[in-house]
C-alpha cells in the first residue's frame, strides 16, 4: 500500500444515478448497481474482521496500513450508501437486500471463528483487487459510460488495488493457514456471484426486463463475452489457490497512479 490520499470521486450530496448509465445496457448497469448494494455492509464486515486481529500487527508499517485500509473502506461505504439511496429512490428494494446481507453477516460473526472471517476478507479483497485492476485497465468500466459513475468506480478500483495486500499481511501475522484461505475463496466467489446476481435479477425484474431474450443474451455476454467476467478475471482469481500466493507480488501500482490521473488531480485531499 503506497498512499493514503483520500479523493472525492463525486460530492455525496450531489450524487445522481441515471437509469441505464452503463452504455444503455441494463444488465451491466444492474450488475454494478448490485455490487454497490453489497459494499457498505461488506466493507464494514472487512473492517470488523481486521480489527479483531490488529494486535497481531507488529510492524509500524503494517499498523499504518491497517489504519489507512480502514479509512479507505469507510469512505467507500459512505459513497456507496449515497449510491444505494439513489437506487432506493429509483424504486429498487435496497432495504430487502440490506436485510438479507445483514442476516448473513451476523450469522457468520456469531458462528464462524474470527480467523476464518479474516480469511474471507483476504479472499474477497483479492477479488475486489482483480476487479479493480480490470476497471483501471479500461475493460470493465470503459469510456462511454456515464462520466460521474465512471469516476466512482475508478476511484473505488484504485483504492482496492492500493490496499490489496493489507488483509493478507495481517492474516499471515495472525497465523492463518493455507487451507483456511482455500475454503474462504471458494465461499467468497460463490457468495459474491450469488449475491450480485440475485440483486441484479431483482432490479431487472423491477424494470420488466428479466424475461426478455435480449436480457439473457446480455447476461451471457456479461459472464462469457470478450470482456466478460470469466475471461477477464477467472485466471487471476485462480492464482489465489497457488500455495504461497501473496497479492503484493503482482506489482500493478502503476494502475493506481493511472487511476488518479484519470480522475484528474484528484488527488485533492479531503473527507466525505
Ligand atoms: Fe472498498
Ligand atoms: Fe478493499
Image (cartoon, grey):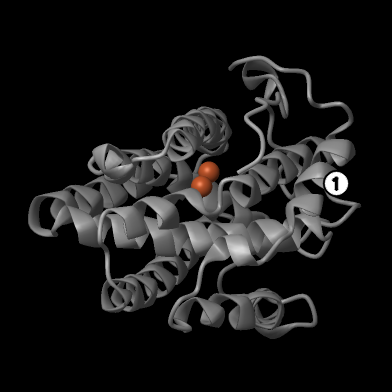
For the point 18% across and 47% down, the residue is 106
For the point 29% across and 38% down, the residue is 54
- Rendering coords of residue 163 (x, y %): 56, 46
For the point 56% across and 69% down, the residue is 210
Residue placed farthest to the left in the image?
A: 111
Q: Quadrant of residue 129?
A: bottom right
Give the residue at mark 1.
258
Mark 1: C-beta under 8 Å from nearest atom of ligand 1: no
Please indicate whether residue 111 sits to the left or right of residue 246 in the image: left
Please indicate whether residue 203 sits to the left or right of residue 194 in the image: right
Q: Quarter of the image containing the N terminus?
A: top right
User: Foreground: 50 or 197?
Assistant: 50
- Rendering coords of residue 236 (x, y %): 62, 76
Please indicate whether residue 88 sits to the left or right of residue 111 in the image: right
- Rendering coords of residue 244 (x, y %): 45, 76
Q: Quadrant of residue 104?
A: bottom left
Q: Quarter of the image containing the C terminus?
A: top right
User: Foreground: 170 or 216?
Assistant: 170
Amino acid at each position: 500500500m503506497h498512499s493514503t490520499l483520500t479523493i472525492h470521486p463525486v460530492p455525496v450530496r450531489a450524487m445522481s444515478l441515471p437509469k441505464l448509465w452503463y452504455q444503455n445496457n441494463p444488465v451491466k448497469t444492474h450488475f454494478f448497481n448490485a455490487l454497490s448494494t453489497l459494499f457498505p455492509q461488506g466493507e464494514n464486515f472487512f473492517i470488523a474482521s481486521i480489527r479483531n486481529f490488529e494486535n497481531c500487527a507488529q510492524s509500524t508499517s503494517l499498523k499504518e496500513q491497517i489504519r489507512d485500509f480502514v479509512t479507505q473502506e469507510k469512505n467507500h461505504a459512505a459513497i456507496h450508501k449515497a449510491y444505494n439511496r439513489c437506487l432506493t429512490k429509483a424504486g429498487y428494494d435496497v432495504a430487502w437486500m440490506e436485510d438479507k446481507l445483514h442476516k448473513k453477516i451476523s450469522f457468520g460473526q456469531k458462528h464462524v471463528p474470527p480467523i476464518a472471517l479474516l480469511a474471507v476478507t483476504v479472499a474477497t479483497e483479492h477479488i475486489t483487487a482483480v476487479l479493480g485492476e480490470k476497471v483501471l485497465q479500461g475493460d470493465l468500466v470503459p469510456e462511454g459510460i456515464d462520466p460521474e459513475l465512471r469516476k466512482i468506480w475508478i476511484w473505488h478500483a484504485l483504492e482496492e488495488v492500493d490496499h490489496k495486500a493489507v488483509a493478507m499481511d495481517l492474516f499471515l501475522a495472525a497465523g492463518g493457514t493455507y487451507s483456511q484461505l482455500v475454503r474462504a475463496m471458494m465461499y467468497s466467489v460463490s457468495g459474491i456471484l450469488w449475491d450480485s446476481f440475485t440483486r441484479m435479477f431483482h432490479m431487472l425484474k423491477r424494470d420488466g426486463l428479466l424475461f426478455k431474450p435480449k436480457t439473457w443474451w446480455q447476461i451471457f455476454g456479461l459472464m462469457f463475452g470478450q470482456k466478460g467476467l470469466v475471461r477477464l478475471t477467472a485466471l487471476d482469481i485462480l492464482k489465489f489457490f497457488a500455495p504461497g500466493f501473496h497479492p503484493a507480488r503482482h506489482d500493478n501500482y502503476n494502475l493506481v497512479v493511472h487511476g488518479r490521473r484519470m480522475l484528474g488531480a484528484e488527488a485533492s485531499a479531503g473527507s466525505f
